Image: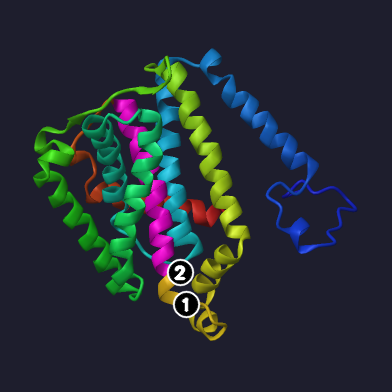
């Protein structure tokens, strides 16, 4: 009853066992949920849609943190800084290079992933309290960068962002921007779910379960720990970019240490639920 698996549901291959939606009931439940979400702008007001949009943007960032903390067993107290970097990067790309907002969002995620790899390279060789201190240092380094790099963030004054647009269609209201966030949530969730089913995803889980056994089996611990930081930063950057183009303004004060602590709590809850 827990997984709604019908009687006589036998799996004859590893591929069947690792499928994302293993039963007909689970596929129907997902389809019903998507239909209900797509109908939300017709049923809910702007306030409720605003809450759902915030849940989607923050949920994408928490999903990346869950890959880092829940699946790889790492610690991060600086996730809000990467979330903020994605927000500022998308705004900077549009203003400086006049790139369409639809392309700025994934590009901001890639830029944030590179920043995450820079901080993840030394942090990937640490564990425990030392790893927590290293990620805490990343938080304060990026906060200081946000305050000083006026060319990138606008400094303490912040930066105005543009609404999401695709051709002549502009998502400048909750009713339209909700579908943009929903599309990214679905794509990013499927990406994370499929990642864990791959060889690299199983290696990440092995690092979490017992890093000594994983190393004996030939898994490069530093490589996969660093990779998990990059993937988590990619998700944080895309979530931050979506957040920026919804609020139409980003400020340095929004991405502080308290934000990181709260996001770590959300990821821990998601990992426990999984």
- Can you see residue 27? yes
Q: Which residue is mark 1?
A: 220
Q: How is the image coloured?
A: rainbow
Q: Which residue is mark 2?
A: 224
**Does the CB distance between marks 1 and 2 fall below 8 Å?**
yes
Neighbour class for label 2 at 10 Å: few (<14), some, many (≥20)?
Answer: some
Q: Residue 26: image x %, image y %?
A: 73, 42
Q: Which residue is at the front of the view, 97 or 248?
A: 97
- Magenta residue span: 224-247
The image quarter in which residue 30 lies: top right
Question: Which residue is drawn at the image coordinates 55% and 15% (left, top)?
Answer: 43
Disc marking residue 96: none
Where disc 2 sits, the SS reads: helix
| Left or right of 209 in this view: 11 | right
Q: Which residue is at the front of the view, 117 or 141?
A: 117
Q: Which residue is at the front of the view, 183 or 77?
A: 183
Question: Which residue is drawn at the image coordinates 41% and 28% (left, top)?
Answer: 51
Neighbour class for label 1 at 10 Å: few (<14), some, many (≥20)?
Answer: some
Question: Which residue is drawn at the image coordinates 61% and 61% (left, top)?
Answer: 198
Q: Quadrant of the C terminus?
A: bottom right
């Amino acid at each position: 009853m827990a997984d709604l698996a019908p009687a006589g549901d036998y799996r004859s291959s590893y591929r069947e066992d690792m499928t994302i939606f293993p039963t007909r009931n689970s596929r129907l439940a997902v389809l019903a949920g998507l239909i209900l979400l797509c109908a939300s702008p017709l049923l809910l007001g702007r306030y409720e849609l605003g809450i759902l949009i915030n849940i989607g943007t923050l949920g994408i960032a928490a999903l990346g943190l869950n890959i880092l903390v829940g699946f790889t067993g790492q610690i991060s107290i600086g996730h809000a800084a990467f979330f903020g970097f994605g927000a500022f990067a998308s705004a900077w790309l549009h203003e400086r290079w006049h790139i369409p907002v639809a392309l700025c969002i994934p590009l901001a995620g890639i830029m944030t992933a590179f920043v995450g790899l820079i901080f993840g390279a030394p942090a990937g060789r640490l564990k425990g309290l030392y790893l927590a201190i290293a990620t805490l240092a990343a938080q304060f380094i990026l906060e200081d960068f946000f305050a000083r790099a006026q060319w990138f963030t606008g400094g303490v004054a912040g930066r105005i962002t543009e609404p999401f647009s695709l051709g002549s269609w502009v998502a400048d209201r909750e009713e339209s921007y909700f579908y943009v966030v929903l599309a990214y949530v679905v794509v990013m969730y499927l990406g994370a779910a499929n990642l864990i089913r791959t060889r690299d995803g199983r290696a990440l889980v092995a690092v979490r379960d017992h890093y000594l056994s994983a190393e004996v089996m030939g898994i490069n611990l530093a490589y996969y720990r660093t990779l998990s930081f990059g993937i988590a930063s990619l998700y944080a950057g895309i979530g931050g970019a979506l957040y920026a183009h919804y609020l139409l303004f980003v400020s340095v004060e929004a991405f502080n240490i308290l934000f990181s602590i709260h996001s770590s709590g959300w990821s821990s809850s998601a990992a426990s639920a999984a």
